[in-house]
């Protein structure tokens, strides 16, 4: 068997023509030979050898050779076959042998030496935790372009062929990863190590030396006469020089990243265009690295050009909207300073779905196929005339609307939340509204909700859309312990975010619990040495299945025993039992960011020889039946609006009203205070309850045993008064809350909040109720006292520390409060498995006895920093360190440093 010589050149290997004779069998047939000595054969059997992983028919298909075809020796057929096999990058050696010749029929054998397969990857030069992180990224990253930022990532899995392309891509992936984080001098060495037991397997040994971060020492501008250095440096969002006032640059690091530097050069030119300099350009730039200091110096030469102004703006092709309507959107008048960046945004800004621009006007009114272009018509002196050319197209409608990626959630559950309905006119704003609704369900990864718009057909004026989702957060388990209220508190809770109550008796639906209908169901138990609380809640987001009307309800039972916080003694013969029931409906309004809810709530407070600091009686009950109404506006947005909003706001105003019983029960509450009960000492001498002195027989004493000079001075029997006053609670209550989220720079978000609450009385003679009050201070987690109180967080002070107190020094809360807060937030990670961010805050707030003492600017203040971590199976965890500047009411002690643990709620 002889090697068949072919002429073939390749970047990987070269097979040169050589003189060899093909052995032939004795035959009566003559092999055709042309004038150049090229022989023609008929291809017979094709044998594949040396191959392990591929099917021989697959290899033959790759070559393009077929039995019975004519081949020439020398010729192109065999060299082309080898070239195709080399292009696969699966083989280290390829040879074609003559196997047999009978007459003019040539049988050949294709011998392949396969490249080794990947067995494992070993990394050196990093800590163990970082090695695991790198291996995970390489194993689970996608090769194809994915996500909003179109990041191409490498995929390394066991069994993959080790070729030069794999090695080069691995090296580039790692270098880009570290350079992206400022390690400009990172080095990656990759070696292939053959398996000692199997020559078809090998390992990749990757040595990583990330080096030190390269930071920018100085940015120098030349040629800028119209714009100051400071303004130009500010325009460069990610390229910042080291600052002596902020050497670490926490939120905008001074590390040098080549890709971000290129973007910032464009931002630099845009800054000039915003200020009228259309022709501004970067003439030259030079980034010089100093290996001795590991610093980068940047020199940028700028040519500013002259300043321009807006001339005439002409609209061409518009029939749907008039010139007047379009000019109002543009917002520029003749003679205005040229601002190329803003002008382009007003014409068409695809990155701002909520922006006021001409493109959105058409896209939000059905014109999917519209095209809007801004062109400079002419320039005369320092004035530029523009044409806005509009191709409107036809009105498009949604055709097929589908969902994918949902393994547990039923399709119709997702489809009913969408504003993209088959047959409905195309509206780009509805796509983003649908994304907000899906995000608010809290059962999908907010960053991986992708509306895949496809099959847009201008002929039929239809478009399909497939909503791609990734499920997460189906349930949360909470097991925690903490210390508060001078006792240890334990909590066990189970929350289901995608429950299906109709399958509760279907054993096959338990995977591990009935899921798929987006109902919310939670069970919670909390206990300490002196209290126990059990609660259950449920929510059906589409009650009746036809309209977005949410049915929600809850029931809870709490029992507290008498507890002395100073001696730590518990008296279980004294207790307060509270039963609470709440049921209501919430409706999404025509504007879907608004929700209106109505509910009825009932609480029964049952006292058994239990002393409350704000009630005179210790046996009996108080009942609270109230109607609640709340209007909420929520248009929070961003990559992860449920956990880390970066735009929009959430505002709510609520009212709580009881029936005005005093209008119909016939009780004169003004005279109630005069209902006295008199007692005298009639037998032996009695000692004074305070001083211990003897009290003579016949002396008048009040209901509490104190002697008085005259029966008219005796105190009223407060027990009977409170029993009548608070048997059914009577009040009205208003709350207002607002959160605003503003993206400042990069991912740095400012959260601004304001809160106000007030409790009033219908009948001033009956007075304000002792329940439903506001308690301020601490983390806001002291929720074990279920007397209707609202625990308002104010960091830098102990829990419930900033409250009004009674004459015994016990906190009784307030009937009015306000609170203001500013937070700077920056994300550490916003991934489906875990989201985390750090924050710095400034809080201020106060509670008041009544509205007469309300002083909105006399506040307790604090500042500090914290961190939040959200994991789908656990929920929100956090820790804050706060410092209170002001004195605690009733003391000379300031709040000072406090540590707060946050579980399951957000500030």
Image: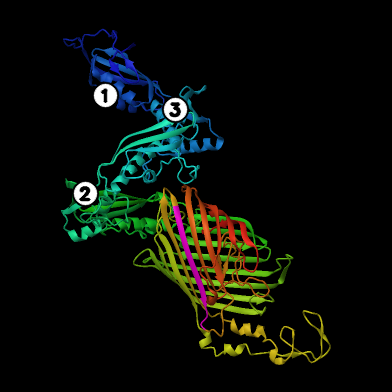
**Dot 3 corresponds to which residue?**
117
C-alpha span from label 1 to label 2: 57 Å
Mark 1 surroundings: few (<14), some (14-19) or many (≥20) residues within 10 A: some
**Dot 2 corresponds to which residue?**
374
What residue span does the magenta drawing correspond to? Answer: 749-762
**Dot 1 corresponds to which residue?**
66
Choose the circle earlier in sequence order: 2 or 3. Answer: 3
User: Foreground residue, 188 or 832?
Assistant: 188
In the image, which is nearer the foreground, mark 1 or mark 2?
Answer: 2
**Where residue 165 appears, x then y in whole percent?**
38, 28
**Where residue 115 appears, x then y in whole percent?**
41, 24
Residue 619 shown in magenta: no
User: Foreground residue, 651 or 640?
Assistant: 651
In the image, which is nearer the foreground, mark 3 or mark 1?
Answer: 3
Mark 2 surroundings: few (<14), some (14-19) or many (≥20) residues within 10 A: some
Residue 332 vertical placement versus 271 (above, below): below
Choose the circle earlier in sequence order: 3 or 1. Answer: 1
Residue 757 shown in magenta: yes
Q: Secondary structure at mark 2?
A: strand
Disc on res. 773: none
C-alpha span from label 3 to label 1: 29 Å
**Where residue 30 appears, x then y in whole percent?**
20, 10
């Amino acid at each position: 068997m002889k090697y068949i010589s072919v002429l073939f050149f390749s970047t990987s290997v070269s097979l040169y023509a050589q003189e060899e004779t093909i052995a032939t069998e004795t035959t009566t047939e003559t092999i055709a030979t042309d004038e150049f000595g090229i022989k023609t054969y008929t291809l017979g059997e094709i044998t594949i050898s040396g191959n392990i992983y591929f099917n021989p028919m697959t290899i033959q298909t790759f070559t393009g050779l077929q039995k019975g075809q004519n081949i020439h020796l020398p010729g192109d057929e065999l060299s082309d076959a080898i070239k195709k096999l080399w292009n696969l990058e699966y083989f280290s050696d390829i040879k074609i042998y003559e196997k047999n010749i009978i007459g003019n029929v040539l049988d050949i054998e294709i011998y392949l030496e396969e490249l080794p397969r990947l067995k494992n990857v070993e990394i050196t030069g990093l800590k163990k935790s970082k090695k695991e992180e790198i291996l995970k990224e390489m194993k689970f990253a996608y090769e194809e372009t994915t996500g909003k930022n179109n990041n191409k990532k490498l995929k390394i899995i066991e069994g993959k062929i080790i070729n030069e392309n794999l090695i080069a891509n691995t090296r580039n992936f790692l270098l880009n990863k570290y350079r992206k984080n400022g390690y400009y001098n990172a080095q990656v060495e990759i070696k292939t190590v053959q398996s000692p037991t199997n020559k078809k397997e090998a390992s990749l040994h990757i040595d990583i030396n990330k080096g030190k971060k390269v930071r920018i020492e100085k940015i120098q501008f030349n040629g800028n006469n119209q714009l100051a250095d400071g303004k130009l440096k500010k325009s460069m969002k990610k390229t910042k020089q080291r600052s002596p006032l902020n050497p670490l640059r926490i939120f905008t690091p001074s590390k040098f990243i080549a890709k971000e530097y290129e973007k910032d050069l464009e931002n630099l030119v845009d800054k000039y265009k915003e200020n009228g300099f259309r022709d501004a350009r970067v003439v030259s730039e030079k980034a010089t690295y100093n290996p001795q200091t590991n610093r980068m110096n940047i020199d940028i030469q700028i040519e500013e050009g002259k300043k321009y102004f807006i001339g005439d703006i002409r609209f061409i092709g518009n029939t749907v909207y008039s010139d007047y309507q379009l000019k109002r959107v543009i917002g520029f008048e003749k003679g205005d300073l040229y601002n190329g960046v803003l002008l382009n945004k007003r014409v068409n800004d695809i990155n701002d779905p909520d922006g006021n621009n001409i493109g959105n006007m058409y896209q939000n009114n059905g014109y999917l196929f519209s095209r809007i272009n801004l062109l400079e018509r002419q320039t005369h002196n320092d004035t530029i005339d523009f044409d806005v050319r509009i191709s409107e197209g036809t009105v498009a409608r949604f055709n097929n609307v589908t969902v994918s990626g949902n393994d547990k959630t039923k399709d119709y559950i997702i489809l009913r939340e969408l504003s993209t309905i088959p047959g409905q006119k195309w509206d780009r704003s509805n796509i983003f509204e649908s994304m907000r609704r899906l995000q608010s369900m809290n059962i999908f990864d907010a960053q991986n909700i992708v509306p895949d718009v496809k099959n847009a057909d201008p002929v039929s004026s239809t478009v399909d859309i497939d909503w791609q989702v990734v499920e997460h957060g189906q349930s949360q388990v909470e097991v925690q312990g903490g210390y508060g209220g001078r006792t240890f508190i334990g909590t066990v809770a189970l929350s289901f975010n995608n429950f299906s109550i109709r399958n509760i008796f279907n054993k096959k639906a338990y995977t591990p619990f009935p899921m798929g209908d987006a109902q919310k169901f939670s069970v919670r138990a909390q206990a300490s040495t002196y209290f126990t609380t059990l609660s259950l809640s449920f929510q059906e987001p589409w009650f009746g299945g036809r309209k977005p009307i949410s049915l929600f309800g809850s029931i809870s039972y709490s029992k507290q025993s008498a507890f002395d916080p100073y001696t730590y003694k518990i008296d279980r013969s004294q207790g307060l039992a509270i039963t609470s029931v709440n049921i209501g409906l919430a409706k999404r309004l025509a504007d879907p960011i608004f929700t209106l809810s109505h509910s009825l709530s009932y609480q029964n407070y049952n006292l058994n020889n239990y002393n409350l600091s704000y009630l005179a009686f210790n046996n009996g009950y108080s009942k609270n039946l109230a109607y609640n109404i709340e209007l909420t506006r929520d248009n929070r947005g961003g990559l992860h609006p449920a956990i880390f909003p970066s735009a929009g706001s959430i505002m709510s105003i609520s009212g709580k009203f009881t029936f005005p019983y005093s209008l119909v029960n016939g009780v004169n509450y003004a005279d109630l205070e005069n209902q006295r009960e008199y007692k005298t000492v009639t037998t032996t001498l009695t000692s004074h309850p305070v001083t211990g002195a003897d009290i003579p027989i016949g002396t008048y004493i009040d209901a509490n045993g104190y002697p008085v000079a005259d029966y008219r001075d005796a105190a009223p029997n407060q027990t009977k008064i409170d029993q009548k006053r608070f048997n059914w609670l009577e009040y009205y209550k208003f709350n207002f809350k607002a959160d605003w989220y503003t993206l400042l720079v990069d991912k740095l978000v400012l959260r601004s909040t304001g809160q106000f609450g007030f409790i009033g009385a219908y009948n001033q003679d009956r007075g304000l109720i002792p329940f439903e009050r506001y308690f301020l201070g601490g983390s806001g987690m002291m929720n074990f006292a279920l007397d209707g109180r609202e625990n308002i967080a104010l960091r830098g002070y102990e829990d419930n520390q900033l409250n009004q107190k009674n004459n015994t020094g016990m906190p009784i809360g307030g009937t009015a409060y306000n609170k203001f807060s500013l937070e700077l937030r920056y994300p550490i990670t916003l991934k489906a498995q875990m989201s985390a961010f750090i924050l710095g805050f400034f809080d201020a707030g106060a509670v008041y006895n009544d509205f007469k003492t309300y002083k909105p600017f006399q506040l307790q203040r604090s500042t500090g920093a914290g961190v939040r971590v959200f994991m789908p199976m656990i929920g929100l965890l956090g820790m804050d360190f706060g410092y209170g500047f002001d004195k605690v009411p009733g003391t000379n002690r300031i709040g000072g440093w406090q540590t707060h643990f946050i579980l399951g709620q957000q500030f």
